[in-house]
Amino acid sequence: MKTTLSATLAALVGTCMIASAQGEKKRPNRPHGPPPEMVKEYDKDGDGKLSDDEREAMRDAMKAKAEERRKEMMKKYDTDGDGKLSKEEREKAGADRKAAMLKLYDKNGDGELSQDERAEMPRPPRGEGGPGGPGGKGPGGKPPGEKPPGDKPAAE
């Protein structure tokens, strides 16, 4: 009985390890935390890093910017004025965003973004809410409603 249990347990652990190794994706080598330009902007004491209070100020500012972008998006795409985006309104916003991305990054003009063209696109800041944020929590990417690149200065 012990042998059967040990063999079963060993097989289970081995299977899990193999499945885990096969599912691993190599992550790009990117620095953790906010980019240097954000540290510079919010580092009030000039020590080159963000204290808890400075991080909180950065988060508050980012939330305020995201809310402003959300309001702008609603103003632009909420055509029926009900305060939310219908499926059609979301599709229109997505199509506009895709068109803007293609205009900026589709270097060969084929109407698609190749892997090389995608690699040239700027990445969102790795701060609060992103995979590199505190504790690695939160969904990655930009907040819903953020304008596509080109609609605002690239200072962010």
Image (cartoon, rainbow, N blue to C red):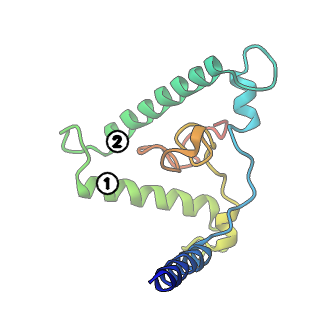
- Confirm or deny contact between disc 1 and disc 2 (CB under 8 A): no
Image point 58% across, 80% down: which residue? 14
Q: Which residue is mark 1?
A: 90
Numbered disc 2: secondary structure: helix
Query: Which of the image's four quarters has the N terminus?
Result: bottom left
First in sequence: mark 1 or mark 2?
Answer: 2
Visible residue check, residue 63? yes
Position of residue 53 measured from the top left corner of the image (x, y, whole percent): 62, 17
Residue nearer the viewer, 137 or 39:
137
Q: Which residue is mark 2?
A: 76
Position of residue 142 measured from the top left corner of the image (x, y, whole percent): 51, 46
**Residue found farthest to the top:** 45
Q: Is residue 106 above or below residue 121?
A: below
Q: Residues within 10 Å of mark 1 (few under 14, many from 20)?
A: some
Image point 63% across, 43% down: which residue? 126
Disc 1 from disc 2: Cα separation = 11 Å
Q: Is residue 32 above or below residue 104?
A: above
Q: Amino acid at mark 2?
A: Lys
Residue nearer the viewer, 100 or 17:
17
* Residue 23 falls in image quadrant: bottom right
**Residue found farthest to the right:** 47
Q: Is residue 9 above or below residue 80?
A: below
Image point 52% across, 56% down: which residue? 100
* Residue 41 falls in image quadrant: top right
Q: Amino acid at mark 1?
A: Arg
Query: Which of the image's four quarters has the C terminus?
Result: top right
Mark 1 or 2, closer to the camera: 1
- Image disc number at residue 12: none
Image point 74% across, 33% down: which residue? 37
Q: Is residue 152 above or below residue 17?
A: above
Q: Is residue 14 left or right of residue 88?
A: right
Residue nearer the viewer, 12 or 88:
12
